[in-house]
């Protein structure tokens, strides 16, 4: 299946307007591959037919969520970029706790199939076991309903849990009653710490229930162009507490951005404004 130039321009412009993701012409083959399954399921012969359906009133109601699921990238792992979790436990949490604050609040922005927020839940629960009075809350969001459904199930193949330290596996992962099954599930008491929801970074306002101490948004903004990245980080800052922290992916940087953030460690930034939204 191929996508003609006109159809590609039409779909890619729509994706940019709705999601902020810019698809350059060298992504035509990738987009064709990801749409192939949808055309088959909808019994449509060509991408032109798909465009007619997508941009119809019915398609705008029913299909756009499937398009978003198809085009978003959802690569993630447990304990991905482990230095971030080391910094969280050794530097950030002790300093935060000395101030005697209320519940520690974290947002996993672009949470994919749940490995990141469940890693955070393991790390924070383990910290709470060693520090009396420490409590935490985690919000986890993504644009893709498909991966959010997977995250809520909290079921993973045993190959996926290889990065999880053995002590944490024993405490936080349940094996199937079928001993031949390669699947494990996050324990209920850990799942209760994570609230999942759908969120589009292009929304003007984020419907978050409280200001945040930490935002993890790693390996997400690389899919946006520079102006979109800067606007997104500015919105993040509106939801950070004063001295709150933003964690980005290893290949991401805020160099040259007009945002009230100071880099304090590799891909770790601290909010500098006293005017963060509450």
Image (cartoon, helix red, strand yellow):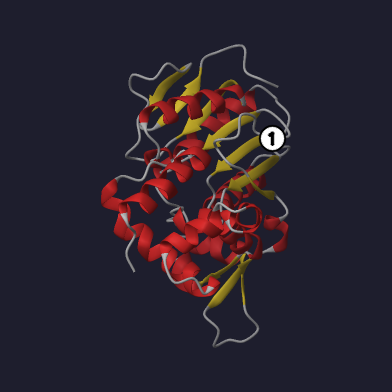
Q: Residue at x 71, y 40 (%)?
A: 135
**For residue 163, which quarter of the picture?**
bottom left
**Figure quadrant of the C terminus:** top right
**Residue 170 rendering spot, x and y as whole percentages:** 58, 66
Front in this rendered view, residue 159 or 96: 159
Tell which of 16 and 126 is nearer to you. 16
Q: Which residue is mark 1?
A: 208
Q: Residues within 10 Å of mark 1 (few under 14, many from 20)?
A: few
Is 245 situated above or below 142? above
**The N terminus: image quadrant:** bottom left
- Residue pushed farthest left? 26
Residue name at image x 55 percent, y 37 percent? 201
| SS type, badge 1 | loop
Observer able to see residue 93: yes
Q: Residue at x 37, y 26 (%)?
A: 254
185 lies above or below 204: below
Q: Quadrant of residue 106?
A: top right
């Amino acid at each position: 299946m191929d996508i003609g130039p006109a159809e590609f321009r039409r779909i890619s412009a729509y994706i940019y307007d709705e999601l902020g993701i810019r698809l350059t012409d060298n992504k035509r083959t990738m987009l064709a591959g990801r749409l192939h399954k949808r055309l088959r399921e909808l019994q449509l012969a060509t991408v032109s037919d798909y465009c007619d359906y997508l941009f119809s009133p019915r398609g705008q109601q029913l299909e756009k969520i499937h398009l978003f699921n198809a085009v978003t990238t959802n690569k993630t792992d447990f304990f991905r970029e482990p230095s971030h979790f080391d910094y969280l436990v050794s530097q950030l949490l002790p300093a935060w706790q000395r101030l005697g604050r209320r519940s520690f609040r974290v947002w996993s922005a672009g949470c994919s199939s749940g490995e990141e927020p469940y890693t955070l839940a393991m790390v924070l629960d383990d910290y709470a076991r060693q520090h009396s009075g420490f409590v935490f809350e985690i919000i986890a969001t993504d644009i893709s309903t498909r991966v959010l459904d997977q995250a809520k199930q909290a079921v993973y193949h045993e190959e996926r849990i290889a990065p999880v330290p053995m002590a944490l596996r024993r405490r936080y992962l349940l094996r199937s009653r079928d001993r031949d099954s390669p699947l494990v599930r996050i324990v209920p008491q850990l799942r209760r710490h994570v609230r999942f929801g759908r969120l589009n970074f292009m929304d003007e306002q984020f419907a978050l229930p409280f200001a945040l101490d930490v935002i993890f948004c790693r390996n997400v903004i690389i899919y946006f162009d520079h102006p979109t990245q800067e606007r997104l980080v500015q919105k993040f800052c509106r939801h950070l507490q004063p001295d709150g922290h933003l964690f980005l992916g290893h290949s991401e940087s805020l160099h040259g951005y007009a945002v009230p953030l100071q880099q304090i460690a590799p891909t770790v930034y601290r909010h500098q404004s006293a005017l963060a939204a509450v």
